[in-house]
Image (cartoon, rainbow, N blue to C red):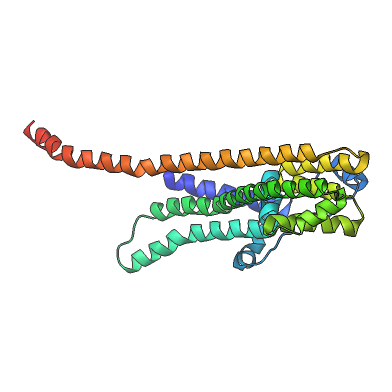
Amino acid sequence: MIEALLWGAGLGVGLWALVVYVFPPRPPLQALVDRLHAAPAPPPILTAESDGWALRVGRPFVKPLAVLGLPNSKLRNDLAVTGKGIEHHLAEKAALALAGLLLPTVMQVLLVVADVGLAWEVPAVAGLLVGLGGFLLPDIRVRKEAERRRSTFRHALSAYLNLIRVLLAGGAGVDGALSDAVGIGKGWAFQQLRRALVTAKLTRTTPWATLGQLGGELDVHQLSELAASVSLAGTEGARVRASLAAKAAALRTRELTDAEGDAQAATERMSLPVVMLFIGFLVFIGFPALASVLAGL
């Protein structure tokens, strides 16, 4: 019964994937018309790189996975933050899933050669579980890396706000303060800020517009708020030094709160091995007495 269910499920999934690959779903007519009349989107500031063995191995599976709607919009933003291409990510998911499916089969063949073979259900179920884990592993890694980079960017943004405030207090203009402040810092965050300002110069747009676009691509609303504040200073002559100081203080407070939360979580995780050791010690002590009682019954 279980064998028939597994074969039927596998056949159904295979036929469904084949039909989707041969006859991909067509977008509705309204979506195509809106795409024709939509204004061209500005070029992205964040760049993505696509290279590696996973892209070469999993390239045939990229189009079917893209037809299924992978990855979602949230994961696309995370991929943009990490600098990883969508095709590379989908190919890596397919390559790891394929490796997970084949690994238990290879182990089963080695065990059969050693005359210690298991029932075929064991490698089949293990292959499905390991393949699912390999399929989901790139998503988990991308989310963690994106969150780490966003945290680093917020930390660098607080320093950038202080530098802008100091330059504005010294009599510099808004454009000059933005350019001079970004030239002082180093690291990935300041590199993205410099790229945004260079993009503004090349496309002849305002720097606060490209900074707002960068904030949207990074999903860092503090940068979008900075762009809005600077736009008021650049277009209407508003005084923003106090606002920048308040934003920098809020960013520092958030970073301290996040650091304290991570430290408390690490402390709680450190107590788990002690609890497990204590439970093992109780079992080690109580098992002989329990075995004696059960043997005397």
Looking at the image, which is closer to me, 189 or 59?
189
Q: Is residue 41 something one can see in this rendering?
A: no
Q: Can you give x and y, in whole percent of width and height, for residue 112 in the image?
A: 34, 65
Give me the residue at 90% from left, 57% from top.
203
Q: Is residue 281 left or right of residue 212?
A: left
Quadrant holding the N terminus: top left
Q: How many numbered marks does the figure carry?
A: 0
Give me the residue at 42% from left, 39% from top.
268
Quadrant holding the C terminus: top left
Looking at the image, which is closer to me, 13 or 286?
286
Q: Can you give x and y, in whole percent of width and height, for residue 210 in the image?
A: 83, 50
Q: Can you give x and y, in whole percent of width and height, for residue 183 in the image?
A: 76, 59
Question: Outermost residue toward the left?
Answer: 296
Give me the residue at 68% from left, 63% from top.
50
Q: Is residue 240 something one can see in this rendering?
A: yes
Q: Can you give x and y, in whole percent of width and height, for residue 276 in the image?
A: 31, 42
